[in-house]
Amino acid sequence: MKHENSDRILPATSEAMARALTILGNGGLVAVPTETVYGLAADATNGEAVAGIFSAKGRPQFNPLICHVSSLEMAQEYAVFDAASLALAKAFWPGPLTLVLPLKKDTKIHPLVTAGLDTIGLRFPKGLTAELIAQYGKPLAAPSANSSGKISPTTALAVYQSLGNKVDLILDDGPCAVGLESTIVKVSAGTATILRPGGITLSDLRKMSHLNLLEAEANASIQAPGMMASHYAPNALMRLNAEKLLEGEALLAFGPHRINGADKAATLLNLSPSGDLIEAAANLFSMMSELDNSGVAKIAVEPITMSGIGVAINDRLKRAAAPRDSDHE
């Protein structure tokens, strides 16, 4: 169904896909649906197109972009894979895992994509976007399709509300299944370091018993997207692990039991009434956005379990609640 508010949002039909390919070939921007969040895609080999991503998002240029590919073979054209990274790719691709690997020399990937680093973040997504990339024949740089530092979009309408006419076309394939960005793992000398938690959990990775697995230090330098302290930030201030609701606050709830004062919430949304972390992850950005759009000055967040994908949820909430740095907005 065509959206009334914008002729830029089109259902992901074959005709819309053909239009997307033309836009990409002309250096334009297309918002694409993935299993994680909607991405703002451009030809990763076209410097002006990539610059268009930074411009549309207002994104700091020292924050590298993830390149999306349609196969392991395409990924191997641009990055050096060792045994550990090959094992990870074969285990979790296509899926919500980004691998940060040594960049091959003399590739056509534009330096803006890697932010001047000698590594590249690669992901092979599931579904429609992989089909688009396969037809296009080149990787697409695609960070989340939202203004930089703001809430990541899990629907086509959320993309339009954040970026408006800054994007040439939004392919609508319904709500994202995972609703949380990919896990980012840097592989070097046989060691895999988790730079950002996400849709692939720590326990998923630990099942690969031969893998030497580390977690990035809290103050690590920016090596991948989503590592800035203040990120995913709504306009309202966020107060985490709330035990009591304060006057005038909205409440982002979790599970069947409410904190004191919840009945007086300006607005209340529950990530998962049953306490299901997968459901909570899928609802996180859309509910944060809905509460933010209600006009409240502060959002209280109930405690969320720190296990499985709950680690990634808490990571996003911590960044959303961090002190704001205007240079990163």
Image (cartoon, helix red, strand yellow):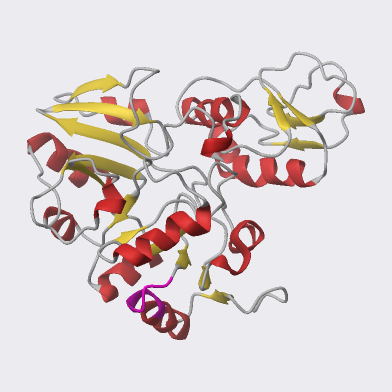
* Residue extending furthest toward the front: 327
- Magenta highlight range: 23-28
Residue 34 at least partly seen: no
The residue that appears at 32% across and 43% down in the rendered structure is 97
Q: Quadrant of residue 268?
A: top right
Q: How far across and down, in percent of the image, does residue 82 sit?
A: 8, 38
* Residue extending furthest toward the top: 243
Q: How far across and down, in percent of the image, does residue 66 sit?
A: 33, 49
Quadrant containing the C terminus in the rendered view = top right
Q: How far across and down, in percent of the image, does residue 288 sit?
A: 68, 40
The residue that appears at 25% across and 41% down in the rendered structure is 99
Q: How far across and down, in percent of the image, does residue 215 sit?
A: 31, 20
- Left or right placement of residue 122 versus residue 4 in this view: left
Looking at the image, residue 139 lies above or below residue 265:
below
In the depicted view, which residue is nearer to us: 267 or 203?
267
Residue 95 at least partly seen: yes
In the depicted view, which residue is nearer to us: 322 or 71?
322
Residue 111 part of the magenta segment: no
Count of numbered circles on the image = 0
The residue that appears at 63% across and 65% down in the rendered structure is 164
Looking at the image, residue 90 lies above or below residue 303:
below
Quadrant containing the N terminus in the rendered view = bottom right
